[in-house]
Amino acid sequence: MGLEGHNLDSQETEAARRIADTIHSGFVDYIAGFNLISRRARSHFEKLEWSLQEADATERLNLHNEHVWKTVGLVEDLLGEQPDRRGEWRSARGHFKHRIAERSDMVLAETYFNSVTRRVFTTIGVDNDVELRWFGATSVPRGEASAEMFTSVTRTRDSAALIVSILESYEFDAPWVDLEGDARRVAARLDSFLLEAWDGLEVDSVDMLKPVFFRNKGAYLIGRLRQLNRIAPIVLPIIHGDDGMRVDSLLLTELQVSRLFSFTRSYFFVEWPNPAELVGFLKSLLPMKSLAELHTAIGFPQHGKTSLYRSLYRHLENSNDKFVLARGTPGMVMSVFTLVSFNVVFKIIKDHFDPPKNTTRDAVMRRYNLVYNHDRVGRMVDAQEFENLSFDRDRFDPDLLEQLLSEAAGSVRVKGDQVVIKHVYTERQVYPLNLYLREMSADKAEAAALDWGAAIKDLAVANVFPGDLFTKNFGVTRHGSVVFYDYDELTLLEECRFRVIPESDDHELEMSSQVWFAVEPGDVFPEQFPTFMRFPRDVPDSIWEKFCEVHGDLFTADYWSGVQEELAHGDLPDFYPYPERLRFRRRTTEAAD
């Protein structure tokens, strides 16, 4: 009897080890694929292969999910009809922990394991019985002593010579158009910053990260200035045109660099064996950026979700405010709520949509997936998709919970003292534009109004038509940028047909409240835009008049058709993650991100 029990234990241990090895192998394959794609970014930049870079961005986005589901199928076969599936999995968890203990990317491996676990056991909330447990705060290495991750450069001559040595150290397989001229321009701005911010030109060292950050048409050299106990970021954006490479700008403040890592931007291509160490270095430059945002920005949105999830639950344990309806005009498609102290909104698709909305749940989810896979060009808020979350019921405002159970019962239910949410999107909270225009000073309102027009045009050039152009569907970030966040009517611009309203000989027919001419799916009439784009009544008329003066072309079919013609040529648009005023002025217009 004892021998039989020993053999059974050995079989269970062997099965658990095979499960752990299978998950580990799946993770290794995922990371290998991720690094291979990220590594290609340098070659694409050097060879001006922008369309290949764009294709790689889409491929890499879906890599994690593809490998996780493949791994789920394999481990389900190994679990088979085991009488104690959870016990087997706990044993596998122990083996897996030993497998990843010495890995430099251990945090990503933990997320991979839990992604597989949640799918195998259809987890609701947190299941510490089978998941890799999280016990609270985790350490994030900042690379203070990691000579492998960055190079420390000291100034032996002037700032221009310092910049030349930095630029030459990266050894791109592409020529510089004017390296010495770039260095002089960068040095002049750097010296001006040091004199104003640090009262002198002294710099103990400049720590430059060895890995280069690539995105769209730009390459970014990222580092930090050090003087005594002070540090400041330093970022050199590089653009590459037909005649060679140029330094396009110099970013030296936390605010400027924060925009580079914005939640409205696509993810960087950057390869480094210890992502947590890389994030730690970035965190030293951007202390206001969360670990979730930084992991997401370097191409690991799944671990970004894990970090956000953990931050939320840590916050709930250390706060008392309740989930409440989010500020702004209630939507017809989404129920939106927030925890005011956490700066994130939660968006749940309603069970039914009132007229005039004519869409479906699947169509809404496809549009959010389109945004996830599309270049957000600094104008669309990144949305993270979660399933099967669970929160204490007493953290919900009673009126909110009643509304959720009424409007979204297919996604929200109460189970004992828990509120279980089957499906939800999270987005960073921004200031709804319609409220911003009413509540801010006239100068800020006018600036936001004009940037709203610029945002619509940026989206158009990126092949995105918002569908709903109401101000309530846009918001203002802390940087003052206007962004789009309501995607239920979004479509590709190339799928629209922009038309002029036809004239009629019958005046009474033209004045009719009913459409008197044939309208096909996809037809858009820009002449009608002013009707619903007009600002709220309590916004000064002068702001609307200024908007029309600057962006009145949005109300013409010719403008939109012209953008479609440009898109048909197949060239990727040029977008910059920093204000135009920070660019070094040139006659040529090669572009970065």
Image (tube, rainbow, N blue to C red):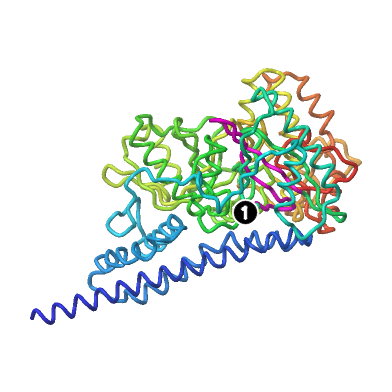
Say which residue label 1 marks: 211
Q: Quadrant of residue 139?
A: top left
Q: Secondary structure at mark 1?
A: loop
Give the magenta range. Answer: 213-238
Q: Write the residue at 53% across / 54% down.
A: 300
User: Is residue 501 in view?
Assistant: no
Q: Write the residue at 68% across / 25% down.
A: 200
Q: Main secondary structure of the magenta part?
A: strand
Q: Is residue 509 magenta?
A: no
Q: What percent of the width, then of the height, locates residue 255?
A: 63, 32
Q: Quadrant of residue 458?
A: top right
Question: Seen from this angle, which residue lies furthest front?
Answer: 156
Q: Write the residue at 64% across / 50% down.
A: 266
User: Residue 496 or 79: which is nearer the viewer?
Assistant: 79
Could you tell me the amino acid type at mark 1? Answer: Pro
Q: What percent of the width, then of the height, locates residue 41?
A: 68, 60
